[in-house]
Amino acid sequence: MRVLVTGAAGFLGRALVRELVRAPAGAAPAGFDASTMPRAGATALELVLTDRATASTDAAQSLVAPAGMRRIAGDIADAALLDRLFAEPPDVVFHLAGIVSGAAEADYAAGKRVNLDATIALLERCRLQTERGGPTPRFVYASSIAVFGTPLPRRIDDATAPAPTLSYGTHKRACELLIDDCTRRGYIDGRALRLSGIVVRPPLDNGALSGFNSDLIREPLAGRDYLCPVSPEATIWIASLRHAIANLLRIARAETLSAQRALTMPSLAVSVAEIVAALAKIDRRAPDHIRYRPDPKLEAQFGRWPLDCRFDRGVALGLEADASIDELLRAHLESA
């Protein structure tokens, strides 16, 4: 079974690869079994990892393929890279590569090229593979709750219509619709998971406007001062890396899906004040390191997520949210 992972050197990508390769040699990859294999009879895993990283970057050093698995560095929007990735047909594609919110907003052309054009090109390769008689790929797409725009509604559930107000969210929503259409036509077996803020990310400047979600946790616990760009009353949706990866694998193996293949990942809805109170349980001095300078525009887009929310479609598929902010913080400390 050949599994292609784009964005494999990223925060999510590295964690997904670690989980995929946990299975013993000769066994199915984590999250799959014989009944869910796109290629009948497949058991062993061949993993193909790709990212824009080059040999001179730190990210490239983290993109290490286990023995017998391949790493192919390159630009996901480059047709020559896609030629190499599809030289042998993949059974499963985890498409994690993308340019995040702030970066896509600052550079429209770059965001469109990577987030939209490259995804369309990937889907086209999958279509050609299927039409040529190869395996129909199971296409797992990392979407985002950015498909919901401002002003955010008082409640979000499975019936809430996406209405993005950032280019990043627009790209994600467009790709969700294309995945629905390609699945309807039989080119792929698609599914898209709308991720919330995944914490705790490392201190990297990747252009994510919601990066304060992780900074608010990481910096005070490290004894460093932090100037928070949203108020204590701000409300956010977050998930631990552990739950995000588990949910990606669960949706990858799900067999019963509706015609609308995009769904919102169950997430923990919590206020900034509640996070700070939980930090104090771990280190009573942590709140002393936090000061506030709210940015009204940023808070409107990223700090007004409704506490009234339901994720019934995801829950029905076995997807899970972190039980509490205390559990999420404990998981972070155990993995640090």
Image: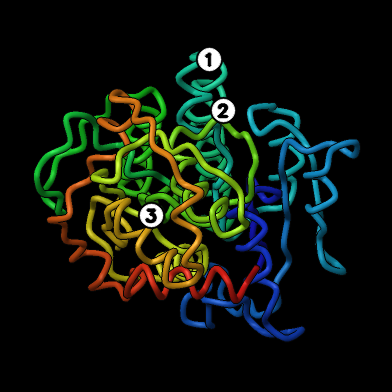
Residue 167 x %, y %: 38, 22
Q: Comparing marks 3 and 2, which lies closer to the viewer? A: 2
Left or right of residue 51: residue 316? left
Q: Secondary structure at mark 2?
A: helix
Which quadrant of the figure has residue 193? bottom left
Q: What's the residue type where badge 1 is placed?
A: Asp
Q: Secondary structure at mark 3?
A: strand
Q: What's the residue type where badge 2 is placed?
A: Val
Check disc 1 and report the residue beneath it.
Answer: 107
Residue 305 x %, y %: 23, 45
Q: Which residue sits at x=44%, y=64%?
A: 279
Q: Residues within 10 Å of mark 1 (few under 14, many from 20)?
A: few
Q: Which residue sits at x=69%, y=27%?
A: 79
Left or right of residue 259: residue 110? right
Quick check: 129 above or below 310?
above
Which quadrant of the figure has residue 91? bottom right
Check disc 3 and report the residue beneath it.
Answer: 191
- From the viewer's side, name the closer residue of 141 and 147: 147
Name which of mark 2 and mark 1 comes first in the sequence.
1
Quick check: 314 above or below 223?
below
The answer to whether residue 140 is visible is no
Q: Which dot marks residue 238?
A: none
Q: Comparing marks 1 and 3, which lies closer to the viewer? A: 1
Q: Which residue sits at x=50%, y=35%?
A: 208
- From the viewer's side, name the closer residue of 50 and 46: 50
Name which of mark 1 and mark 3 comes first in the sequence.
1
Residues tagged 3 and 2 counted as in contact (Cβ below 8 A): no
Q: Which dot marks residue 114?
A: 2
